[in-house]
Image (cartoon, grey):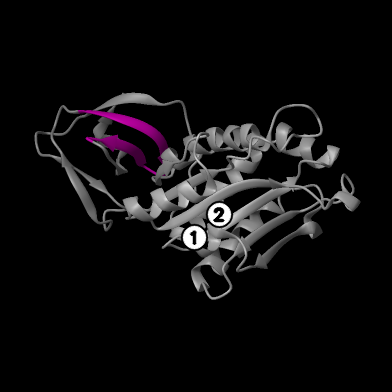
Amino acid sequence: MPKIYLSPSTQESNPYITGSGSEEYNMNRLADALEPYLYANGIRFVRNTPDMSAASSIAQANRLGGFDFYLALHSNAAAPENSGSVRGVLVFYYPTSAEGKRAAELFAANLKRVYPLPDLVRTVPTTALGEVRQPKYPANLLELGYHDNYADAAWVENNMDAIARELARSLTEYFGLPFIEPQPVVQGTVSTSGSPLRLRAYPSAAGQTIALMPNGVPVTVYGAWQGWNTVEYNGNLGYAAEAYIES
């Protein structure tokens, strides 16, 4: 199953013009909204913490290893002479990273579905940002509106779930997975005739087997799609045939 490093902003000194809180606060709210979509879509993740920095987030991701993508969530601010007058969403990627560019194009296309000025959503190659230059993995840094612009700041604050949905949709398209809406998390039990149930990397009988789940073991169910459940078992996240999960 794919695994990402999720890095919401740690910039607590950047206030939202609306007074709702800082960039760090709002990007962590967005990461909170994104988590149920990641679980429902079988995307494992490690997330930084507010006491970290961009540099320590990069270092942690590189030290831990095993990630397929690095996603940094930020909001923007204009230069002082233009403060409050600039709007838009920017998706940064490293210019020589084909996979980073592919992901950036997916994020931009899907964010246009929810940002009120879709023509102002664009991808930007850069070598200046550490969070796209330094991770060992394909990486994007998203500047989700301008927090010094009232309309943009309000858009972020009032559309957390809609933004999270499009971020998750983009990740599923990047990883070649179906998009699954999250559902209330429930506890289930494997119920077969006695043989173990396969936990798979893709919701198909042809999907790679991640683990074998014995009859009667408890599992956590995060989503459902065309006869399959997204489930977690013994630390493994994947898909199992819905007919053999009792809740």
Verify whether residue 230 appears in magenta: yes
At label 2, the amino acid type is: Ser
| 221 relative to 136, above or below | above
Q: Where is residue 202 in the image (x, y as percent from the top left)?
A: 33, 53
Residue in view at x 42 percent, y 50 percent: 4
Label placed on residue 142:
none
Secondary element at image label 2: helix
Residue extent of the magenta highlight = 218-234
Residue in view at x 28 percent, y 56 percent: 207
The residue under label 2 is: 170
Q: Is residue 150 left or right of residue 143?
A: right
Label placed on residue 174:
1
| 214 relative to 218, above or below | below
At label 1, the amino acid type is: Tyr
Give how far apart the Cα atoms at labels 2 and 1 are: 6 Å
Q: How crowded is mark 1: few (under 14 residues within 10 Å), some or many (20 or more)?
A: some
- Residue furthest to the bottom in view is 96
Q: How crowded is mark 2: few (under 14 residues within 10 Å), some or many (20 or more)?
A: many
Verify whether residue 7 appears in magenta: no
Instruction: Tell me the quarter of the picture where residue 66 sits.
Output: bottom left
Majority secondary structure in the magenta region: strand
